[in-house]
Image (cartoon, rainbow, N blue to C red):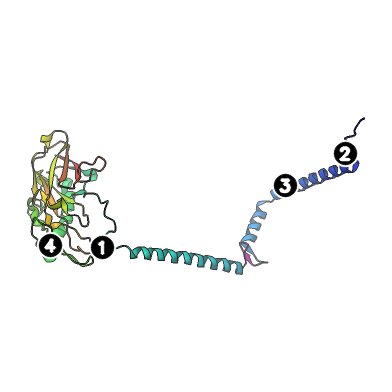
């Protein structure tokens, strides 16, 4: 017995009608796409102008005046709210922070050091008989030492007892007194008697200064000393070095109470007078501070407790 699996005639007609309808829709879509592609530049520009300003509907960029007013009002209120929240957060944060003392000081590194005058790449190269080669160095030193002039120090700061910390009690906002560090204390490196700071004689002076750390008691009761040595090469190339006023930082200049309360504070200096550097050689010099709680051999930080520079005198 055979079974006829062919679909009924009316179902077959329905399939044909559906297929014809889909072909007709695809054909109409293609025609619309082709018509859109046939738009010239003038029509595109005209549509753009109409989008920017539609005189019939009185719309700008597809929105009328009421719509623009509502959206601008929304963003105005939204950003005003954000600004208020941000200002409130900053105000709350500032209430917890003292402008005089840092909140967290448990990870403060030991002090680094800086040297004056400044030189490109810390390479001091000059000819003692040629003023043009060393005058930028001496001008920088004179400018730096203006704050240490004797008359200014006597007028603003007080004399302190050497060899002991200058501890001052009081509220954290009260102004503290600062100890005098007079320029004349640097002796041959003060620039008073010799305005060339020894550069004209081939015996230059450099100034070493420790970076300020609030509340730091240098040396933990013992003065921090300064020493210089040849960093690379022959040790005899450096020669003798004299230090003024001494080869250490006196305890009386510590602790430091911050720039808002220690208004007239001037950091103590140690002048290094290089008396016999071998001429016509690149002499690599390392000057460092030594004492308790001092780090001067950090591998990745060459300014932590030491400074390395090169000197070439001709």
Q: Nearer the viewer, mark 3 or mark 2?
A: 2
* Nearest the eye: 154 or 169: 169
Q: Are marks 2 and 4 in contact (CB under 8 Å)?
A: no
Residue depicted at 16% across the width and 44% down the height: 288
* Nearest the eye: 144 or 213: 213
Separation of residues labelled 1 and 2 (CA atoms) = 95 Å
Q: Nearer the viewer, mark 1 or mark 2?
A: 2
Residue depicted at 19% across the width and 66% down the height: 170
Image-based side of 74 in relation to 163, left or right: right
Give the residue number, with chain letter if any, for mark 1. Answer: 100
Separation of residues labelled 3 and 4 (CA atoms) = 89 Å
The mark that comes first in sequence, 4 or 1, is 1
Q: Which mark is residue 73?
A: none
* Mark 4 Cα-neighbour bin, 10 Å: few <14, some 14–19, many ≥20: many
Q: Nearer the viewer, mark 3 or mark 1?
A: 1
The mark that comes first in sequence, 1 or 2, is 2
Label 3: state its secondary structure.
helix
* Nearest the eye: 105 or 135: 105
* Mark 3 Cα-neighbour bin, 10 Å: few <14, some 14–19, many ≥20: few
Residue 304 location in percent, x, y?
Answer: 22, 46
Q: Which mark is residue 7?
A: 2
């Amino acid at each position: 017995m055979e079974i006829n699996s062919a679909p009924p005639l009316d179902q077959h007609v329905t399939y044909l009608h559906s297929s014809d309808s889909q072909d007709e829709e695809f054909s109409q879509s293609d025609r619309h796409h082709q018509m859109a592609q046939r738009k010239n530049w003038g029509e595109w520009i005209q549509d753009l102008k109409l989008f920017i300003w539609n005189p019939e509907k009185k719309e700008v960029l597809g929105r009328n005046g009421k719509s623009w007013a509502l959206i601008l009002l929304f963003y105005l209120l939204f950003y005003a709210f954000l600004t208020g929240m941000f200002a409130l957060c900053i105000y709350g944060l500032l209430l917890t922070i003292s402008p005089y003392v840092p909140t967290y000081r448990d990870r403060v590194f030991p002090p680094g050091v800086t040297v004056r005058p400044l030189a490109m790449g810390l390479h001091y190269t000059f000819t003692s008989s040629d003023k043009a080669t060393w005058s930028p160095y001496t001008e920088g030193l004179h400018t730096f030492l203006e704050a240490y002039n004797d008359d200014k120090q006597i007028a603003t700061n007080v004399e302190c007892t050497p060899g002991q910390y200058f501890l001052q009690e009081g509220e954290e906002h009260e102004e503290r007194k600062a100890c005098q560090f007079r320029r004349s204390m640097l002796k041959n490196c003060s620039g008073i008697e010799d305005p060339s700071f020894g550069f004209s004689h081939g015996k230059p002076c450099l100034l070493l200064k420790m970076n300020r750390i609030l509340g730091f008691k240098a040396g933990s009761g013992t003065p921090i000393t300064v020493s210089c040595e040849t960093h690379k090469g022959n040790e005899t190339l450096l020669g003798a070095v004299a230090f003024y006023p001494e080869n250490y930082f006196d305890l009386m200049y510590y602790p430091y109470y911050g720039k808002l309360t220690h208004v007239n504070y001037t950091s103590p200096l140690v002048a290094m007078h290089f008396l016999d550097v071998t001429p016509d050689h690149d002499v690599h010099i390392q000057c460092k501070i030594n004492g308790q709680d001092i780090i001067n051999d950090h591998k990745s930080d060459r300014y932590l407790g030491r400074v390395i520079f090169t000197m070439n005198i001709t």
